Amino acid sequence: MTASQATTCGRTTLTHPGKSRPDGGGSTDGVRGTVATGRAAQELELKRGEFDLAVLLGLIGTEESPGGGIPRVRRAEIDRLRATAGFPESLRDKVRTAGTAEAASLLGISPVRFTGLARIGCVAPVAFYLNRYRAVVWLYLVEELTGFAAREPELLTGRTPAGMRTMLEAGRDLRARNWRARRTDRLLGRTADPWVRAAVQAAALDPVQLAEVVDDPYERAYLARMRPAAGFGRPGSVSGREAMEQLMLADEPDEILWCRVNLAMELDRARESRAAPRPGGVGEPYGAASVTAGQLVVPGRPSDGAVGRGPGRGTAPRRRRPGLRLLTRLVGGRPRDRAR
């Protein structure tokens, strides 16, 4: 490994590729102008959970690392945030969260009443964690709670409206659904890549539902690779992680159908932009036919050598027309199955 000289405060020191500079102004892996997320959280005086939430809410801009990997934060972004009035308290206030008991205390109501308001969707959770009993603890933005109290003071006192009581008596609970919808909207707003957008929608479907919408195994593998991070901390056990991942799945018929519709539309756009990687290097955009200049292409019966070949065996994937078999993918099953 070669070393280069750097002068710091009148001293000449040696720096190596991949190492941080003595002044601490560089990143730990030599990517100029950016720092790792852990370092950024320290400089912004945020706990790691607060930092992750700030990124999800769009308060802190990030950029992808060269070659993929964990996103990084530009030095200019850190300087901008540190220069804002009231830093660091002003930034912390925007990501301050409260559980049910603290939220009820802030609003001056009982925890039971607050839970009812959250269950019917008056306030939406922004994050959650599992306690030591593996019970879900929902967290709410304090800034949104105070805004709700100012907009709807009549819901904090007196009798609960009849419509709300009916929903609660029927067992309605929209907390997980509202959290999923909020997370999906935020993630979609952070990317323009059609395959990443499709992966965001696919994350809300279980493997069976996903396979009914995306019947190509190579595309499902690509969606899994492009899937964004779960967005929660590490639980203490495998069962805890499984419980958390279960919360990320749509669980009501209308929500599942909505996710399938959105995934089908995003997938059609993704296929038009480029094909999912396949063995053999086949991965050109759908519809980009490689035809030699002057060659006459006549539709007809494929040659004997092409019969029986599937994607990944030397043939380019077929172009899928937008909307083709959309209804089939949404309701599940294949036309020949429904005809039986």
Image (tube, helix red, strand yellow):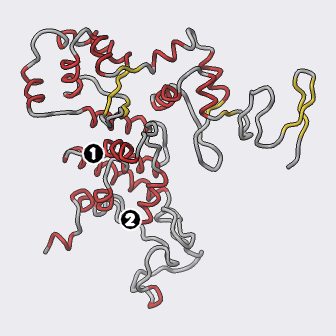
Q: Is residue 337 left or right of residue 56?
A: left
Q: Return the residue nearer the eye: 208 or 242.
A: 242
SS of the residue under disc 2: loop
Residue 324 lies in what quarter of the image?
A: bottom left
Residue in the picture at 60% in, 33% down: 37
In-image side of 208 versus 19 (left or right): left
Q: Looking at the picture, which amino acid does disc 1 mark? A: Ala
Residue at 31% over, 42% down: 247
| 308 horizontally vs 154: left or right | right
Please tell me which residue is depicted at 45% across the width and 88% down the height of the picture. Answer: 303
Extreme front residue here? 132
Q: Secondary structure at mark 1?
A: loop
Position above or below: 37 against 329: above
Residue 320 circle label: 2
Residue found at the far bottom of this picture: 304
Q: Residue drawn 57% across and 12% down? A: 87
Q: Is residue 339 above or below residue 306?
A: above
Compare residues 70 and 306 and report the one nearer the observer. 70
Residue 121 image position (x, y, % from top left): 23, 27
Task: Give the amino acid at mark 2.
Answer: Arg
Q: Which mark is residue 79?
A: none
Q: Residues within 10 Å of mark 2 (few under 14, many from 20)?
A: few
Mark 2 vs mark 1: in front? 1
Work out whether mark 2 precedes mark 1 in sequence or the reverse, and give the earlier one. 1
Dot label at residue 250: 1
Query: Quarter holding the C terminus?
Result: bottom left
Residue 30 image offset from top left, x and y in percent: 74, 40
x and y percent of residue 281 in the render? 57, 69
Marks 2 and 1, how far apart in space?
Answer: 27 Å
**Mark 2–mark 1 contact, CB under 8 Å?**
no
Where residue 273 appears, as percent x and y from the top left, is 48, 56
User: Compared with residue 34, is residue 198 higher up or lower down, i.e. above or below?
Assistant: below
